[in-house]
Amino acid sequence: MVERMLRFVSVEKGMPDKRDPTTRRGDFGEIYGEFARDKAAEQAARCSQCGIPFCQVHCPLQNNIPDWLKLTAEGRLEEAYEVSAATNNFPEICGRICPQDRLCEGNCVIEKGFESVSIGAVEKFITDTAFERGWVKPIVPRREFGQSVGIVGGGPAGLAAAEQLRRCGYQIHVYDRHDRIGGLMIYGIPNFKLEKPVVERRTRLLAQSGVVFHCNVEVGANVTLAKLRQRHDAILIASGVYRARHILAPGAGLKGIHAALDYLIAANRVGLGDHVVAFAGGALDAKGKQVAVIGGGDTAMDCVRTAVRQGAKSVRCLYRRDRANMPGSQREVHHAEEEGVEFVWLSTPEAFLGDDHVRAVRARRIHLGVADAAGRQIPTTIEGSSFTIDADMVIKALGFDPEDLPVLFGAPDLAVTRWGTLKIDQRSMMTNLDGVFAAGDIVRGASLVVWAVRDGRDVADRIRTYLQAKADTRPLAAD
Ligand SMILES: Cc1cc2nc3c(=O)[nH]c(=O)nc-3n(C[C@H](O)[C@H](O)[C@H](O)COP(=O)(O)OP(=O)(O)OC[C@H]3O[C@@H](n4cnc5c(N)ncnc54)[C@H](O)[C@@H]3O)c2cc1C
Ligand code: SF4
């Protein structure tokens, strides 16, 4: 076969067509289109097939990237799909929303001087094509087992574990307090990054594979953890982190100041066709407003870009560090800037002004001082540097902490770390309660979808080992 690879010397990096900012400001559709088949093959052929694929090393799933790039370049797409699906339950989702600049693509060997291979875009193309062609099929386990697993949380960690365990033939029940399955992939991450039908076709496939979803069931409120333990042979807690961090500043209780997730959940629900009272009444709608978003992570970027699409009069993002030191993906900052968001770097809110409703934010300038033990420069406020910006809607996007699960689940013995995340044995991934496992953000703290998938796959392996041991120790039935 003619060698098709190593084309990075003659072919420039390309991405699927990106919609121009003016058009995309007007709707919530994804901003990138799909590669044409020949373009995907051409881009995949830029891979140098290097001896040590650092892209694979730095992918949390250790995806076999060079192999599926080569298969794509050779037009062997069905095989590329098989290889890609072997290590990732949701390649088309990771291809869309992984911060590739920090993971696979950021470590591509040809990045130095030639720009990386468009790994994420090719990964998305392969599995989107597989769905179109009908290559993605529901699971039919080779053997059914009577043992069942109850999974608390239908986010990426819970769903990846559900798929892996169902494949082994266990009976899987997923409990979620929301009315839709998908976790933050449905109610956190906006449509313009990840269109909801992409998530819904995955949950449909799992349902067709025999996974049973119990929506609107809040563990703690509707059923206790103890009850679930009686019902199932093993439990996985994959409930994510949802307690929003607050700002302690005068005026923080004024009307018009909202938590990021309240705002994003409302926007996502409206996009899904729900009637949301707080949106219809105007409180959670940015239309015509001067919006200030506080924070510099991915959540903040999603809020500013949602506000732009809702028709805000102006959108500013206040962040206490500078661009180089922000936690959010640089790619997302770039998209936000293209869409007209103004960044006020090195600033922190000092007070929220207004009588009953917020009308402005008084902020102070920040100086980044010496680095702390973790190597991050410590921000200190500059005396006398106060300034005011008009804002009649303020969104706090300062990160999330775990809820108090021992209290919420009515399980006071459930051990947590000093950060409130669940404590697990690193080898067995089990909590201190026998047969109760945990994975995803509730163990790691707020992280990424790709890490949740990794944790979901790992914990499924541990649960399988546990269930096998449990089955083996059952007394033999008398003849
Ligand atoms: C706004 C935003 C944008 C993000 N953007 C990106 C991005 O671009 N790329 C990326 O990789 N990551 C992104 N992330 C992070 C990513 O979404 C999370 O790391 C990932 O979803 C964690 O997966 P999980 O399965 O652990 O938890 P979740 O996705 O949080 O799922 C947990 C599920 O548990 C359910 N649950 C919680 N408590 C209970 C209970 N008591 N009873 C029943 N069900 C319960 C919840 O309803 C939820 O469905 C973003 C996060 C946010 C908030
Ligand atoms: S899963 Fe994420 S990090 Fe891994 S190859 Fe895909 S886009 Fe890159």
Image (tube, rainbow, N blue to C red):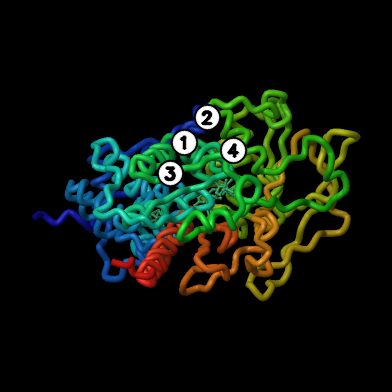
Residue 191 in percent (x, y) is at 50, 36
Q: Nearer the viewer, mark 4 or mark 1?
A: 1
Q: Nearer the viewer, mark 1 or mark 3?
A: 3
Q: Is mark 2 within 8 Å of ligand 1?
A: no
The disc, 4 or 3, on the residue closer to the chain's N-terminal end is: 3
Task: Please give the residue where the numbered disc 3 appears in the rendered image.
Answer: 212
Task: Please give the residue where the numbered disc 2 appears in the rendered image.
Answer: 272
Q: Nearer the viewer, mark 4 or mark 3?
A: 3
- Quadrant for the N terminus, please: bottom left
Q: Amino acid at mark 4?
A: Arg
Q: Nearer the viewer, residue 211 or 300?
A: 211
Q: Is mark 4 within 8 Å of ligand 1?
A: no
Q: What secondary structure is marked by label 4?
A: helix
Q: What secondary structure is marked by label 2?
A: loop
Task: Please give the residue where the numbered disc 4 appears in the rendered image.
Answer: 305
- Contact, CB < 8 Å: mark 1 with mark 2? yes
Q: Amino acid at mark 1?
A: Lys
Q: Nearer the viewer, mark 3 or mark 2?
A: 3
Q: Amino acid at mark 2?
A: Leu
**Label of residue 196 in the image:** 1
Q: Point out the quarter of the image occupied by ligand 2.
A: bottom left
Q: What secondary structure is marked by label 3?
A: strand
Q: Residue at x 34, y 60 (%)?
A: 63
The disc, 2 or 4, on the residue closer to the chain's N-terminal end is: 2
Please tell me whether residue 413 is drawn above or below residue 391 in the rendered image: below
